[in-house]
Amino acid sequence: MTIAAHRRHDLSDRVWELLEPRLPGREGAWGGKARDNRQFINAVFWILRTGAPWRDLPSDYGDWKNTHRRFCRWRDRGVWEGLLEALITEPDFEWLMIDASHIKVHAHAAGARGGNQDIGRNKRGLNTKIHLAVDAHGMPVRVLVTSGSIADCTQAGKLIEGMDAGHLLADKGYDSDAIVEQARGQGMQAQIPPRKNRKAQRQYDKDLYRLRHLVENAFLHLKRWRGVATRYAKNAASFLAAVHIRCLALWMEIL
């Protein structure tokens, strides 16, 4: 049987067997049983992978309004983030790496009720920022979304909170006494290059620091999905959910 071109990236049986037992509406779970969980997940992945408007969802994935409404329900209930946490299995915390990346905001994402949500402006236009923590293999373990004008270092505390790693790797934008002290308090050695204006230059492991490219590689993988590379969602929570889903796909080896 010929598979339609737009369905060539649908979930494989192997991936579905990994994901299905963790979904709401499954057989034996509290509440009603959902008959179309697999179709729904495929629909959401298609939207985020292509960056298409919800109205352009191919009809064989189901009604776009119902799909979008269900996506929002799962977002508000924390289902997407919970799925990601459930699938982060055996992360390698020999070292922890953090960084941030600007995301261009499409004009359609502006104008949310009550004002723009986590959207900043610079000389390149509207932008949002993704703050990311990855393990020693470059796999995402925590993600935050802020306005693009928010300094990277202000989110470091939240990114590493509760993490138990051997080393913390970050660029000099994270060089602050507060971050270094928090890392030490959590048992991590901070491998962060000191700023030039520091009176007392702090030593760091330059060889280990070179591995920080893994977090930059993680951003490249995240942005392979157009719905993450550009923000189309007016609601900041929806964009954060999109990033959670992309990270979820990476853990399920859906590149």
Image (spheres, rainbow, N blue to C red):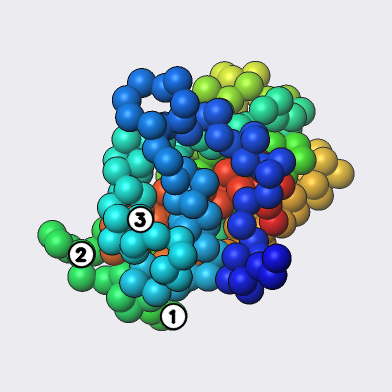
Q: Which residue is mark 3?
A: 67
Write the residue at 35% across / 44% down. 75
Write the residue at 76% across / 40% down. 137
Write the residue at 29% across / 43% down. 73
Answer yes or no: do the residues labelled 3 and 2 have beta carbons within 8 Å?
no
Marks 3, 2: nearer the viewer:
3
Residue 22 - label: none
> Which of the pair 171/68 is nearer the observer?
68
> Which of the pair 63/173 is nearer the observer?
63
Rate crowding at label 2 as few (under 14), some (14 to 19) or many (20 or more) other CA atoms within 10 Å: few
> Which of the pair 148/193 is nearer the observer?
148
The quadrant in which the N terminus is found is bottom right
- The local secondary structure at tag 2 comes to loop
| Earlier sequence position, callout 3 versus callout 2 | 3
Tell me where residue 46 appears, x and y as whole percent.
52, 63
Rate crowding at label 1 as few (under 14), some (14 to 19) or many (20 or more) other CA atoms within 10 Å: few
> Which of the pair 181/20 is nearer the observer?
20
Question: Can the viewer see residue 79?
Answer: yes
- The local secondary structure at tag 1 comes to loop
Q: CA distance from mark 1 to mark 2?
A: 21 Å
| Kind of residue at disc 2 | Ala
Q: CA distance from mark 3 to mark 2?
A: 20 Å
- The local secondary structure at tag 3 comes to helix
Q: Which residue is mark 2?
A: 112
Rate crowding at label 3 as few (under 14), some (14 to 19) or many (20 or more) other CA atoms within 10 Å: some
Tell me where residue 20 appears, x and y as whole percent.
55, 35
| Kind of residue at disc 1 | Arg
Is residue 124 placed above or below 118 in the rendered structure? below
Q: Which residue is mark 1?
A: 124
Instruction: Give the mark count.
Output: 3
The quadrant in which the C terminus is found is bottom right
